[in-house]
Image (cartoon, coloured by chain):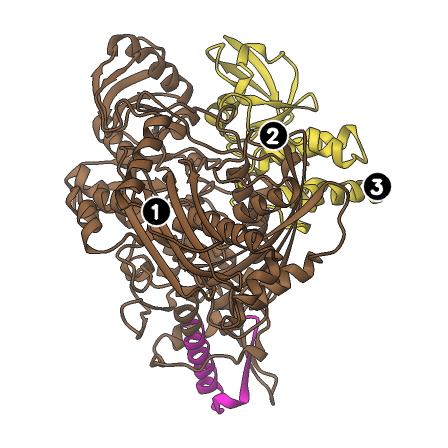
Chain colours: A brown, B yellow
């Protein structure tokens, strides 16, 4: 998917005309135009007279499979094969903004949830118009026609016309406002384990990520940023950097300095030669111990509640800051000219990139073109800080610049999953089940950091403390279980470390806490953890089904090899419910995860192959974090720097993963994130079953030695 | 320094700073961007290429240390005029998600299977130390076994 191919697709359709269709999220009306540029219209579906079918995928592809699943929805209603569709990665247009979203973005496991309806509607409308065009040509009733693989067929006469031949005429017909959709029993593609359309490009090295972008005359840059967050540049040795072969300029940018050179390696050597120093910063002096003190003080401010009874729990849980550590380091290519700006960027928020680029250059947003590329991992990290830097660097040198962070910069300047501490006070009734559940949570607010960056004022962040509690910190504390009294309190703590959204966000830490504590309650009551949960889910049939399925697939209760044990956890997030059973053994303090059985209820679904991929991946991603990952703070900065000291899971540490998908007719739920939350508690519940040691801090790391 | 490298069976004359890592020679000088930058310290394996058939982490191999006349193979030329058994197995098992690390994974897997036609699980674990953050490891394991079957069938 090269840049030239994209340009070709657009211009070729412009020349040849055809049918252009789409519908914006703000209006239920489907729009059509035979004339204007699809790029300007933001229309999704383009059928050329040359039979080329173009589709602008409104979400970015970061591994979650949208460049396969979204075309599948369209292809199903349009009656074409997914392989017939040319994918175009969306630029910025309000039509690509999800309904209810304040900006065009990909996140929150919403692509299928939000795009299914408008995409199926667009495909169905186009099909009806093409059939009508054929029926008019043949002077027959549309009901006598069928569609298949991009053709309209008149059943009785055997006459056929391709969609391309009909596109021009169809584009002049009235667009049906509410076209009938297929009954799910008629689906050929939706629900099938179709192979990914991006597979071939990704096994041959042809897939183009941001870091692979080439622009004529391009220079390269890399950055040095303040280790203490929001520190000021104090001094740097510009002459030394400029004396490095190939170095062109040293530019002050957001959060630090960029060195621009003819080649990346020269830029990196130039950056080393800067010997840059910073001063101050909002996390100055912070370390792991002080961080935990702040969290503990916040819990103390909330104060303990009084609990009574023979069987009670009063426990504290801690989770560290985490990096996203996407395999593709942050990067962006920008070309700033006097009257326009082009940006090529792997980002989850292209509209914000456009607006920030306009702000940095003094151009109007309409003068900024954002080309999104494949993302080498996203997980919530990819915003716009690095894109601003690329724009600043290009503007300073007057040439296109590809700016690439080193892994060290990436590790030390992430928007981290916040660290949290929770206090849980639970009282069991005479029946052994929780009669009251009190959860106090202390930690940073990811949404306030996000809001602050968006409006360039801290006011929004601090206002959030008062107007409502922060869902990005507290989501996942609500339980599906029947517990008579449930209380939740949240205290915002701001230690000064940059925070953001990390795959499954608030659920990523709260699920660990609540599903571990529920296990503690079951043990205190002397009950089996599965049976205990099921007994609390009498009013939650979907949760029960998921839990029972995972347990059945794992053969819960069956005998295991010597030294092995199982743990279970259940969590609902992003409109989907996931249960996981983990089988572990612990030998000389080292945990070995053998098998993970997952069950998911994500309602109606598009592609079970992609769901399995996402669940398997979520298990490995979550296990990596639970077992090994921790950002360590020292002198106000992140002490980790690369994969040697920010340890992540490798293949040898990866379990067998089995995925079971519940079949039902419920509304679609998310798939990218819901597999992450249950894995940490299921793991630690298994460790408890194996060793009798309750893990209340992550990562597990060396705690069992 | 000047040196001629044989990259994907083409002799290319290069005049570069001696400490330039082979990774950046391939990406920025030769324009072969299938080989990826991940860590720069030979930890993650995204930059894996073959040097005379052996897997090397090109981010940590300076230009000056690449022997003249050695044969360098990248993902773009893993198999001339078709797909290598590992690439076909990767598609069959639907391995890639984001896809960024997969060039390196494929090069590591191809080298493993070249030396060891039927690797055991332990041998796969030892040979495949490349990092994937999407968590494709379970499928990589299956795909390597599948590729080994392909090689046996086609031998």
Give the camera-side residue of A409 and A441. A441
Residue placed most toward the observer, A71 or A539? A539
Cβ atoms under marks 2 and 1 closer than 8 Å: no
Q: Find residue A701 and report its horizontal and vertical position in percent.
A: 54, 31
Q: Is residue A137 magenta?
A: yes
Q: Which residue is mark 2?
A: B74
Q: Residue at x 38, y 44 (%)?
A: A422
Q: Position of residue B72 (x, y in %)?
A: 63, 23
Which disc is residue A213 wearing? none
Q: Which residue is mark 3?
A: B152
Q: Are marks 2 and 1 on the same chain?
A: no
Write the residue at 21% across / 50% down. A464
For mark 3, name the chain: B
- For label 3, count other residues whose C-alpha is less than 10 Å away and answer few (under 14), some (14-19) or many (20+): few
First in sequence: mark 2 vs mark 3:
2
Read off the chain for label 2.
Answer: B
Q: Secondary structure at mark 2?
A: loop
In the image, the segment drawn in magenta is A122-149
> Which residue lies under the disc numbered 1?
A441
């Amino acid at each position: 998917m090269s840049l030239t191919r994209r340009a070709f697709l657009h211009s070729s359709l412009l020349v040849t005309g055809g049918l252009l269709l789409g519908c914006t999220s703000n209006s239920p009306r489907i729009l059509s135009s035979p004339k204007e540029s699809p790029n300007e219209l933001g229309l999704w579906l383009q059928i050329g007279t040359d039979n080329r079918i173009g589709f602008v995928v409104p979400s970015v592809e970061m591994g979650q499979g949208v460049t396969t699943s979204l075309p599948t929805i369209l292809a199903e209603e349009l009656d074409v094969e997914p392989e017939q569709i040319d994918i175009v990665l969306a630029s910025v247009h309000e039509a690509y903004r999800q309904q209810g979203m304040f900006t065009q973005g990909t996140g929150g496991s919403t692509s299928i949830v939000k795009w299914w309806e408008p995409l199926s509607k667009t495909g169905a409308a186009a099909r009806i118009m093409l059939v009508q065009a054929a029926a008019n040509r043949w002077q027959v009733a549309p009901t006598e026609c069928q569609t298949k693989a991009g053709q309209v067929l008149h059943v009785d006469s055997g006459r056929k016309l391709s969609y391309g031949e009909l596109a021009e005429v169809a584009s002049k017909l009235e667009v049906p406002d509410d076209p009938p959709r297929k009954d799910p029993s008629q689906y050929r593609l939706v629900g099938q384990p179709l192979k990914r359309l991006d597979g071939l490009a990704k096994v041959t090295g042809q897939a183009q990520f941001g870091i692979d972008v080439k622009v004529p005359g391009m220079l390269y840059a890399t950055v040095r940023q303040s280790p203490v967050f929001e520190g000021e540049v104090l001094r740097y040795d510009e002459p030394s950097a400029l004396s490095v072969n190939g170095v062109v300029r040293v530019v002050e940018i957001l959060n630090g300095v960029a060195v621009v050179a003819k080649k990346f390696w020269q830029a990196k050597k130039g950056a080393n030669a800067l010997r840059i120093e910073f001063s101050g910063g909002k996390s100055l002096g912070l370390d792991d111990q002080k961080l935990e003190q702040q969290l503990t003080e916040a819990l103390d401010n909330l104060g303990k509640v009084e609990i009574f009874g023979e069987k009670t729990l009063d426990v504290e849980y801690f989770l560290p800051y985490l990096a996203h550590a996407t395999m593709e380091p942050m990067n962006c290519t920008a070309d700033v000219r006097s009257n326009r700006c082009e940006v090529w960027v792997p980002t989850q928020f292209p509209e914000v990139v456009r607006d920030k680029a306009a702000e940095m250059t003094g151009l109007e947003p309409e003068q900024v073109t954002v080309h999104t590329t494949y993302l080498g991992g996203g997980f919530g990290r990819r915003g716009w800080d690095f894109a601003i830097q690329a724009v600043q660097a290009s503007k300073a040198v007057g040439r296109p610049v590809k700016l690439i962070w080193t892994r060290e910069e990436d590790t030390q300047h992430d928007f981290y999953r916040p660290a949290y501490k929770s206090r849980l006070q639970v009282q069991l009734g005479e029946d052994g089940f929780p009669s009251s559940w009190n959860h106090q949570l202390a930690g940073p607010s990811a949404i306030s950091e996000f809001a602050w960056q968006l409006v360039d004022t801290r006011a929004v962040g601090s206002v959030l403390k008062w107007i409502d509690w922060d869902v990005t910190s507290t989501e996942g504390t609500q339980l599906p279980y029947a517990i008579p009294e449930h209380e939740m309190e949240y205290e915002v703590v701001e230690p000064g470390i940059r925070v953001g959204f990390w795959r499954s966000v608030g659920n990523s830490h709260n699920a660990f806490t609540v599903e571990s504590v529920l296990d503690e309650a079951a043990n205190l009551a002397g009950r089996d953890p599965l049976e205990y949960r099921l007994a609390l889910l009498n009013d939650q049939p979907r949760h029960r089904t998921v839990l029972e399925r995972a347990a059945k697939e794992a053969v819960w209760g069956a005998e295991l090899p010597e030294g092995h044990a199982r743990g279970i956890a259940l969590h609902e997030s992003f409109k989907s419910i996931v249960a996981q059973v983990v089988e572990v053994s612990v030998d000389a303090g080292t945990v070995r995860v053998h098998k993970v059985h997952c069950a998911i209820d994500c309602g109606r679904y598009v592609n079970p192959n992609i769901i399995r991929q996402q669940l398997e991946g979520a298990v490995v991603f979550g296990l990596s974090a639970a077992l090994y990952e921790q950002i360590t703070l020292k002198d106000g900065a992140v002490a980790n720097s690369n994969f040697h000291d920010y340890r992540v899971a490798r293949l040898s540490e990866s379990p067998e993963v089995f995925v079971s998908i519940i079949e039902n007719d419920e509304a679609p739920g998310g798939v990218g994130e819901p597999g992450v939350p249950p894995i940490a508690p299921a793991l630690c519940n298994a460790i408890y079953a194996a060793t009798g040691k309750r893990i209340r801090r992550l990562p597990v790391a060396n705690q069992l030695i | 320094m000047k040196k001629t490298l044989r990259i994907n069976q083409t002799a290319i004359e290069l005049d570069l700073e001696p400490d330039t890592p082979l990774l950046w020679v391939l990406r920025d000088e030769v324009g072969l961007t299938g080989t990826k930058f991940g860590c720069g310290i030979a930890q993650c394996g995204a930059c894996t290429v073959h040097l005379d058939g052996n897997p090397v982490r090109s981010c940590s191999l300076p230009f000056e240390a690449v022997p003249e006349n050695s044969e360098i193979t990248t993902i773009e030329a893993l198999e001339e005029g078709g797909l290598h058994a590992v690439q076909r197995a990767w598609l069959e098992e639907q391995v890639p998600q984001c896809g960024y690390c997969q060039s390196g994974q494929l090069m590591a897997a191809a080298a493993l299977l070249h030396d060891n036609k039927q690797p055991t699980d332990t041998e796969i674990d030892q040979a495949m130390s490349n990092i994937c953050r999407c968590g494709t490891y379970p499928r990589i394991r299956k795909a390597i076994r599948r590729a080994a079957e392909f090689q046996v069938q086609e031998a």
